[in-house]
Amino acid sequence: MTDDGNHVTVRLYGPLRQAAGGRDVQLEAGATTVKDALAQLAACKGSRVADMIFDQQGAVWPSLILLVNDEPADLREASSVASGDVISILMPLAGG
Amino acid sequence: MSGDSSPKAKRVFTEEQIERYSRQLLLPEVGGEGQRKVLAARVLLIGAGGLGSPVGLYLAAAGVGTIGVVDSDRVELSNLQRQVLHATQDLGSEKCLSAKATMEGINPDVRVVPLSIRLRSENILGIIADYDIVVDGSDNFPTRYLVNDACVLAGKPLSHAGILRFDGQVTTVVPGRGPCYRCLYPQPPAPGMVPSCQEAGVLGVTAGVVGCLQATEVIKLILGIGDPLVGRLLLYDGLDMTIRTIRIRRDPACAVCGDSPAITELADYEEFCGLRAAEEIAS
């Protein structure tokens, strides 16, 4: 979608939220896939966030859970996103 | 009164038990039959820390007859902000013994089995064999994967939770009925990616809220009531004060509960979690 309100929101949980300095990040550039959105997030939030999302080969860490509007997103299927969608990124928590 | 007595011995409640459990005996979902199940239940707590404390307190108060407590640590001052099983007078004591004293002090119907040991691939299956339900309140990824895999291999229901800062995650694994922890997180994060509570902190109440959710799940499993968090991950956010659940699916390719599991016996989880390699790099 390319309307004037085009944005995708990335909602961060756990350590990623702390690293990015906030819960929600609005991507203004109009991502069309989850992977696009993650790349934009990494670009705008710096290397610490980028390292928490992508491994050295540029693949998304398998220890992340990705959701689009609370439904699991499958990167192998290049899950698409549209304006207004919310991508959630979850990480496991070890603390007890 | 011992908590591991035979069903026959628990057939009739004493006057004291009727009074002690009156508020939950009133619940149609519990009643006398349910309370007998609770008294006969055997639950294993992995960890007597932030999560294990509220779980242990509420399971003991509810009358869970036998509660095993695995923890090899001793009580430290920095524990007391959230580990409410222990008190200042317990500083330096073994946590599992402190936990036993507190829990049995709350309810003499409960027998607590202290296990001051480190869980390993070679001992965990023998330990969980004695229990109906396992509660993961550990504080590190190697133990979490070990506990998950052991429960899947042994077919034991598992209440899983993890916490950090103001956040918590809770799910319930019932092998054969839904996804396991590995379906959710096939691999642990790279070393250093997810800080511990020691590194990033945790609000004591976060442990309390999330541990109480786990205790609720355990009691539901014992009673066979309600809709446990099987196939769902509950997300608790104390800053936003929101609780929501997301659907999670069993992964047919899961290494331990999948259609063709690669894991058929337990192994070295420190290496799997990259800790040994990280330690070597650091040294």
Image (tube, rainbow, N blue to C red):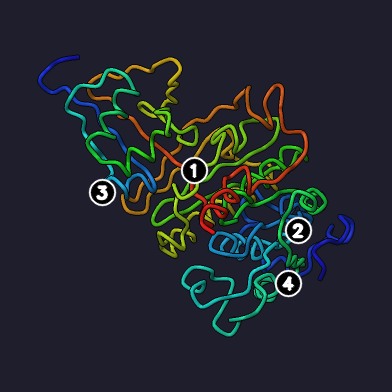
Where does residue B241 sit, x and y in percent of width and height? 34, 51
Observer-side mark, 3 or 4, equals 3
Query: Can you say whether B100 is above or below B34 in the image?
Result: below
Query: Same chain for the residues at labels 2 and 3, yes or no?
Result: no
User: What residue is disc 4 on?
Assistant: B16
Q: Amino acid at mark 1?
A: Ala
Residue B190 numbered mark, or none: 1
Query: What chain does mark 4 sit on?
Result: B
Query: Can you say whether B230 is above or below B281 in the image?
Result: above
Where's the N terminus of chain B, which quadrant? bottom right
Observer-side mark, 2 or 4, equals 2
Characterize the local packing of mark 4: few (<14), some (14-19) or many (20 or more) Cα atoms within 10 angstroms: few
Query: Same chain for the residues at labels 4 and 1, yes or no?
Result: yes
Toward which corner of the image does residue A16 lie, by quadrant? top left
Cα distance in 3D space between marks 3 and 4: 54 Å
Q: Amino acid at mark 2?
A: Leu
Characterize the local packing of mark 3: few (<14), some (14-19) or many (20 or more) Cα atoms within 10 angstroms: few
Cα distance in 3D space between marks 2 and 4: 14 Å
Query: What chain does mark 2 sit on?
Result: B
Q: How many marks?
A: 4
Secondary structure of the residue carrying tag 1 is: loop
Observer-side mark, 3 or 1, equals 1
Query: Same chain for the residues at labels 3 and 1, yes or no?
Result: no
Query: Can you say whether B48 is above or below B231 in the image?
Result: below
Q: Amino acid at mark 3?
A: Gly
Where's the C terminus of chain B, which quadrant? bottom right
